[in-house]
Image: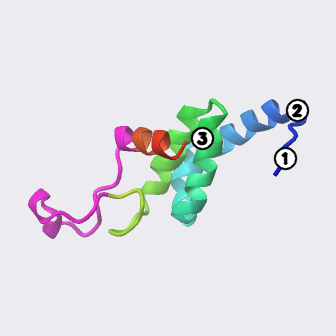
Amino acid sequence: MSITLHESAPAAIAELSSVFGDGLTAYDTGSKFTCTEADIIARVLYLTGQEEAAVTWLMGHAEGEDWDDTHAHEYDQERGDAERTSPRHFNEADIRGHLAAIA
């Protein structure tokens, strides 16, 4: 596949970053996306130098994770998960590590 970037691509990426990197958008709509969809958006942001927007986006997405989802820790009874009604979502450091891994 050949990709040709238009001269306006950097401005468009900055606009995309301002939308998906906005906390209100990320936390209100991020959980409505599948993990794969959220990762694709985050990867584009991350690879185009918009790391903070990518982190914000995935932090918002992770708020809606279930036990078996990508951005939540696996069930661990020793860490008190038997007492929890929802999983331990990835924190900022976990998200940054995840972004580096999918880049």
Q: Is residue 92 magenta?
A: yes
Q: CA distance from mark 3 to mark 1?
A: 27 Å
Reading the image, the residue beneath label 1 is 2
Q: Nearer the viewer, residue 84 or 95?
A: 95
Circles 3 and 1: CB atoms closer than 8 Å: no
Give the mark toward the camera: 3 or 2. Answer: 2
Crowd rating for badge 3 (residues with CA inside 10 Å; few <14, some 14–19, many 20+): many
* Residue, far left: 78
Q: Residue at x 35, y 50 (%)?
A: 90
Instruction: Name the element at disc 1.
Output: loop
Which amino acid is tagged 2? Answer: Ser
Residue range corresponding to the magenta coloring: 73-94
Reading the image, the residue beneath label 2 is 8
Give the quadrant of the C terminus: top right
The image position of residue 91, as x and y in percent, is: 34, 44
Crowd rating for badge 2 (residues with CA inside 10 Å; few <14, some 14–19, many 20+): few
Q: Residue at x 55, y 57 (%)?
A: 30
The image position of residue 42, as x and y in percent, is: 58, 46
Q: Nearer the viewer, residue 40 or 14?
A: 40
Q: Is residue 78 magenta?
A: yes
Q: CA distance from mark 3 to mark 2?
A: 20 Å
- Horizontally, is 85 left or right of 30 in the view? left
Instruction: Name the element at disc 2.
Output: loop
Instruction: Name the element at disc 3.
Output: loop
Q: Is residue 48 above or below residue 42?
A: above
The image position of residue 1, as x and y in percent, is: 81, 52
Q: Is residue 27 above or below residue 82?
A: above
Which amino acid is tagged 3? Answer: Gly
Q: N-terminal of the two: label 3 or label 2? A: 2
Q: Which mark is residue 21?
A: 3
Which amino acid is tagged 1? Answer: Ser
Determine the image quadrant of residue 29. bottom right
